[in-house]
Image (tube, rainbow, N blue to C red):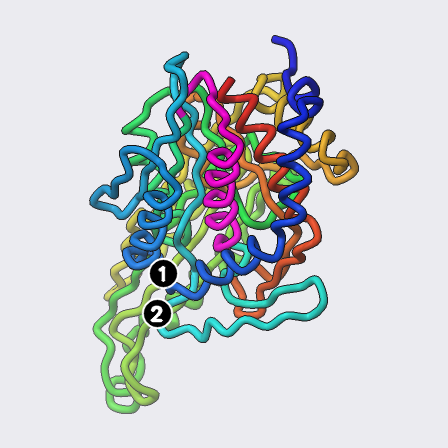
Amino acid sequence: MNNPIEALAQQAVVRTALAQIGEDLPAIVELAIAVQQIPAPTFAEAVRAAFVADRFAALGLQDVQQDALHNVFGRYPGRGGGAPIIVSAHSDTVFPAGTDLTVRRSGTLVHGPGIADNSLGVAGLLYLVGLLRQHGWQPARDIWFVVNTGEEGLGDLRGMRAVADRFGPAGAYIVVEGGLFGRICHQAIGVQRLRIGVETPGGHSWGAFGNPSAIHVLGQIIADIAGLKVPATPKTTFNVGVVEGGTSVNTIAHEAHLLLDLRSEAPPALGQLVAQVEKLLARYGREPQVQVTAEVIGNRPAGAIPRETPLVSWAVAALQQVGAASQLEFTTGSTDANIPLSRGWPAVCVGLTESGNAHRPDEYMDVTRIPAGLGQLLLLTLAAAG
């Protein structure tokens, strides 16, 4: 299939729109900040969803609606030619309710929790809708704009699972992240997350000394996990991210648990890592007065499409057209694109600018690349929608 990006980029209306993005940069940044100022922890995205739904309606999208998960949908009508295109950005953040969302500017940098991940992604999607409407594009296919929930943490991509169930094998899924500029993700890593719990009789630290402690056993389990051997290729990783338990400083812990994140580029390697963890847990579970449990709390499926797939080729060509060929990097990752990719459907994740300190209170984005990032997204969306 011929690559349409170069022809699109030569059209006068497209050149005008690309130039306009740079002129609109201050407004785009302010929109990202407006989104960022609305708390949206995973499982508590309703207020941000209402904001997006109002903006979708004001921008003239059709069939604007929310589902039970607070995914927000809006349709940009095409001429009825072929399956629709889905352009999505996740609304949730890793930051709990009550987080100080103060924004600070320093030159071209804007600092604030969630400012790039994914407030800019949501703002960029809203801006793209307005740009399409302003220039009157009439694509062959419908474009469904979606701001979905549950991408972060224990959300387990539940929002995108519902989106994929609704639309099925659409013409393309284009996933938008605020950071990750220049990175094109068409390969999804597999992720399995476990809640590992330990229960023991516990007791008083003096009077019941000698009874097994759930915290001590859990610590031994963590040490054994840290000693696991994993391959460098395919890249395979593990991480204990949360440890909780115990009652007081002078109580032998009756209960403790941890949250474990296991990842790999290759499903067989992930399966082998899971088996190693299960084997060591079984050993501890045989100890007297010790009960060990493991609950799957997240399972993000792996998947990939070839680099030669038109959608991926278009993403590359669009990046080249906005003058950022040197930024190109093919990456594997865990994003909303995991769901369509795991089902063999065309999907790609692209980013809008360079950012840093993701998932930290001092997260920041550099606004310099936003025009190029949105330019790539515009070209990619137009190509996919015909």
Vertical order, 346 against 219 (above or below)? above
The quadrant of the picture occupied by the N terminus is top right
Q: Which mark is residue 354?
A: none
Rendered residue at 53%/70% (across/down): 361
Q: Is residue 108 toward the left or the right of residue 252 in the image? A: right
Q: Tell me which residue sits at (32%, 52%) in the image.
A: 49
Please give the residue where the numbered disc 1 appears in the rendered image: 41
Q: Which residues are magenta?
A: 118-142
* Element carrying mark 1: loop
Please report the residue visible at 28 percent of the width from the left and 56 percent of the height from the top: 46
Question: Identity of the amino acid at label 1?
Answer: Pro
On the rendered structure, is 355 left or right of 270?
Answer: right
The residue at which mark 2 appears reads as 97
Q: Is residue 124 magenta?
A: yes
Residue type at numbered disc 2: Ala
Give the dominant element type of the magenta stretch: helix, strand or loop: helix
| 1 and 2 marks in contact (CB < 8 Å) | yes
Q: Position of residue 119 (x, y in %)?
A: 48, 55
Quarter where residue 372 is shown: top right
- Residue 171, given in percent of the width and then of the height, sits at 43, 19
Determine crowd level at label 1: few under 14, some 14-19, many 20+ residues with C-alpha closer than 10 A. many
Residue 257 as seen in the image, left or right of residue 219: left
